[in-house]
Amino acid sequence: MTELYILRHGETQWNTQQRFQGQADSPLTSEGERQARLLAERIAALSPSDVYTSDLGRSFSTARIIADECGLRPESDIRLRERNVGILTGLTFDHIRDGHADIWERYFEVDYIIPEGESLNQLLDRGRSFLRDIAAKHTHERIIAVSHGAFISTMLRHVLHIPHNAPRSFALYNCALNMLEYVQGAWRLRVLGDTSHLDRESRMLDEVQ
């Protein structure tokens, strides 16, 4: 059995402003760095074999904190990047809802390509490619992947067979832990949105998408 721990990055400045980050970047806040250190302590106790990460700064910074605690080096994989939200990048949810209602109305249609961005199907294709490689290369290993809210949501919906246009009924907090296990040729969810490693002082910001 292979275990894949999929982690969302720590809190960023744009997270606190509810801005869509997409494949642009916003640095971790001091709170985000603290969240990553708390998560790193928990991950180190699992003795993972490898740490993969999106190459975007907020994810890589989180992964580096985790990897350092585990005595590993983070390995970038662009397939773990956030959805490219194109012309919505940097805008707040309210701005998108009020100023780009036509785009928001189609945002969760799987084949809809955001202007200058990508569709959910394109995101799903690279996510499934990553899962196939992990299953093939890391049999009976414990692997870490640090990524982003929309990516994680899309992959969890894929594994759970939840329609991508259905309202999301689970939280995706910064530095939350999700775990998939590969058993008998299929991925299944074992842990969802675990934040027990965070403390009472941690800000719990859900993914806005």
Image (tube, rainbow, N blue to C red):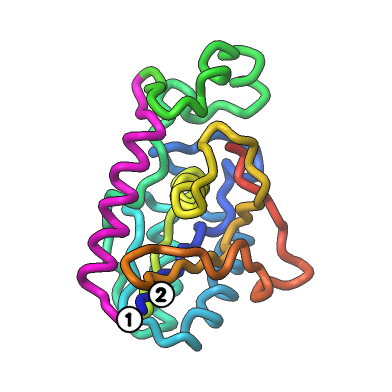
Earlier-in-chain disc, 2 versus 1:
2
- State the extent of the magenta-drawn residues as a range: 116-141
Q: Is residue 70 magenta?
A: no
Q: Main secondary structure of the magenta part?
A: helix
* Residue 10 % position (x, y): 55, 59
Q: Is residue 29 above or below residue 125?
A: below
Q: Mark 1 is on which residue type?
A: Glu
Q: Is residue 118 magenta?
A: yes
Label 2 packing within 10 angstroms: few (<14), some (14-19), many (20+): many
**Contact flag, marks 2 and 1 (Cβ < 8 Å):** yes
Q: Quadrant of residue 124?
A: top left
Residue hosting label 1:
141
Q: Secondary structure at mark 1?
A: loop
* Residue 204 % position (x, y): 71, 56
* Residue 16 % position (x, y): 65, 44
Residue at 73% of width from left, 72% of height from top? 199
Residue at 65% of width from left, 51% of height from top? 170
**Horizontal side of residue 151 vs 201, given as left or right:** left
**Horizontal side of residue 87 vs 177, given as left or right:** left
**Horizontal side of residue 83 vs 170, given as left or right:** left
* Residue 20 % position (x, y): 53, 34
Q: Quadrant of the C terminus?
A: top right
Q: Secondary structure at mark 2?
A: strand
Mark identifier at residue 20: none
Residue at 59% of width from left, 63% of height from top? 192
Residue hosting label 2:
3
Label 1 packing within 10 angstroms: few (<14), some (14-19), many (20+): some
Q: Is residue 175 above or below residue 140?
A: above
**Horizontal side of residue 93 vs 84, given as left or right:** right
